[in-house]
């Protein structure tokens, strides 16, 4: 059986291009926000609000996709909003405008995510889902590595030209939208939940399988203490300070090293995503996710020690393996626990609740960082990762075993 179908390949290329656009900007956004007057606490609030918005929309639009039995209209609109938001970030710099544009960008992600993941799940069997999601995540993350490389090269020659970079990010963003028009779909089974209001997707909990109801709480508690990667980038920059690295006669400062570390993380993630998916298909979702959460605990514990430049790169490499072992695998696990008629709803329900947790996670991290220092914030996340490992080990059953 062919594991990577034409639909999976096109969706993966779409994600690759969209992530090039997003990740050209992601490493510089915290620096850009600080330059226009945002404090660490306000950055935490911003990231929390946009994650919260995206999360609620994932649940609603996931269920709406199941209600309509259609995926592609949601995928097209979602990627279009993401593409349009990139240049708008540079137009005005007031906090209200920045919040509005970032929210629009994440709203686009919320509209497309459940429908896209349901399309991916429909292209796989229960025995191959982790590899399909792993391949998609790998391609997505190649884009996440290429984007910062473009940003790094551009800012090397044009230091501080963040506004122009926002305009350039529109190009791969709109190309990703055009690719989607190569896809066609047949109408899917209609949701068994029926119609409802914006929050009706929460009703999925009542009909969810026992395995789903045991797994999701653990993932949500973990999300509550897994703050935005923006904080990793901020800590990296502050740890490096005025230190520089010279390679082949070229001197790299804190900004360049921070972006390089993020590129390295994404390269490791991209390379490890499919192997981790293959591992999950063969050995089980549970073992793979447990490995990922354990690595997360190591990474956040390491960042709590104010690491050196060398250790920072080691930790970002381990962080890449953690992401590869969890993000795609968790989605594959969830789709195996849901019926075909409610796939997008099941993913959307989880994503919505996860983003509500992420909203508070970014606020908590920002507040702890401000009140007690960065080490306390990262150490708390590390301890939470260990606790969640223990819970999953003892109470959550793997449907593949």
Image (cartoon, rainbow, N blue to C red):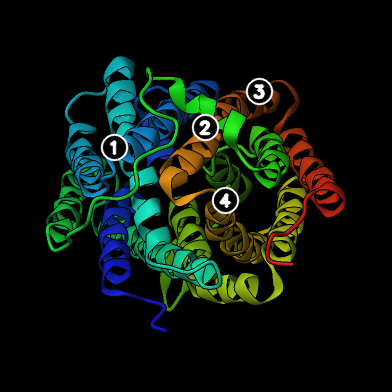
- Find numbered disc 3 in the image and state the secondary structure of the residue it sits on: helix
Q: Is residue 371 left or right of residue 328?
A: right
Q: Nearer the viewer, mark 3 or mark 4?
A: 4
Question: Which of 348/142 is in front?
Answer: 348
Image quarter of residue 81: top left
Spatial separation of the CA atoms under disc 3 and disc 1? 31 Å
- Earlier-in-chain disc, 4 versus 2: 4
Q: Residues within 10 Å of mark 4 (few under 14, many from 20)?
A: some
Q: Is residue 170 left or right of residue 326?
A: left
Q: Residues within 10 Å of mark 2 (few under 14, many from 20)?
A: many
Q: Is residue 153 visible?
A: no
Question: Which residue is disc 3 drawn over?
Answer: 370
Q: Is residue 7 left or right of residue 227?
A: left
Question: Which residue is disc 4 drawn over?
Answer: 334
Relative to 370, say whether 282 is above or below.
below
Q: Is residue 193 left or right of residue 172?
A: right
Q: Residues within 10 Å of mark 3 (few under 14, many from 20)?
A: some
């Amino acid at each position: 059986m062919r594991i990577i179908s034409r639909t999976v390949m096109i969706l993966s290329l779409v994600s690759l291009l969209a992530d090039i656009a997003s990740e050209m900007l992601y490493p510089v956004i915290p620096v850009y926000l600080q330059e226009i007057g945002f404090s660490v606490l306000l950055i935490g609030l911003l990231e929390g609000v946009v994650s919260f918005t995206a999360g609620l929309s994932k649940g609603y639009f996931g269920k709406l996709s199941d209600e309509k039995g259609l995926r592609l209209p949601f995928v097209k609109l979602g990627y279009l909003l993401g593409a349009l938001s990139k240049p708008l970030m540079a137009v005005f710099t007031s906090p209200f405008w920045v919040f509005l544009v970032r929210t629009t960008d994440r709203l686009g992600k919320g509209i497309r995510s459940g429908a896209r993941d349901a399309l991916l799940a429909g292209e796989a069997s229960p025995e191959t889902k982790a590899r399909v999601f792993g391949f998609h995540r790998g391609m997505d993350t190649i884009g996440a590595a290429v984007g910062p490389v473009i940003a790094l090269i551009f800012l090397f020659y044009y230091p501080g030209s963040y506004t122009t970079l926002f305009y350039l990010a529109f190009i791969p963003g709109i190309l990703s939208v055009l690719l989607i028009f190569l896809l066609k779909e047949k109408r899917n089974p209609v949701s068994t939940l029926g119609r409802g209001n914006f929050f009706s997707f929460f009703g999925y909990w009542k009909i969810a399988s026992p395995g789903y109801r045991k797994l999701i709480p653990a993932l949500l508690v973990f999300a509550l203490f897994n703050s935005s990667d923006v904080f990793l980038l901020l800590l990296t920059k502050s740890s490096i300070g005025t230190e520089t690295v010279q390679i082949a006669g070229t001197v790299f400062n804190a900004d360049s090293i921070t972006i390089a570390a993020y590129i390295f993380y994404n390269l490791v993630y991209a390379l490890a995503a499919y192997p981790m998916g293959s591992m999950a298909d063969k050995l089980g979702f549970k073992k793979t996710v447990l490995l990922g959460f354990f690595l997360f605990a190591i990474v956040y514990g390491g960042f709590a020690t104010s690491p050196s430049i060398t250790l920072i790169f080691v930790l970002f490499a381990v962080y890449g393996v953690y992401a590869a072992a969890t993000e795609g695998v968790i989605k594959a696990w969830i789709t195996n626990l849901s019926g075909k008629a409610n796939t997008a709803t099941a993913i959307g329900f989880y994503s919505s609740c996860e983003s509500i947790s992420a909203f508070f996670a970014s606020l908590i991290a920002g507040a702890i960082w401000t009140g007690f220092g960065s080490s306390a914030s990262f150490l708390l996340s590390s301890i939470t990762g260990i606790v969640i490992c223990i819970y999953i080990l003892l109470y959550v059953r793997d449907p593949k075993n």
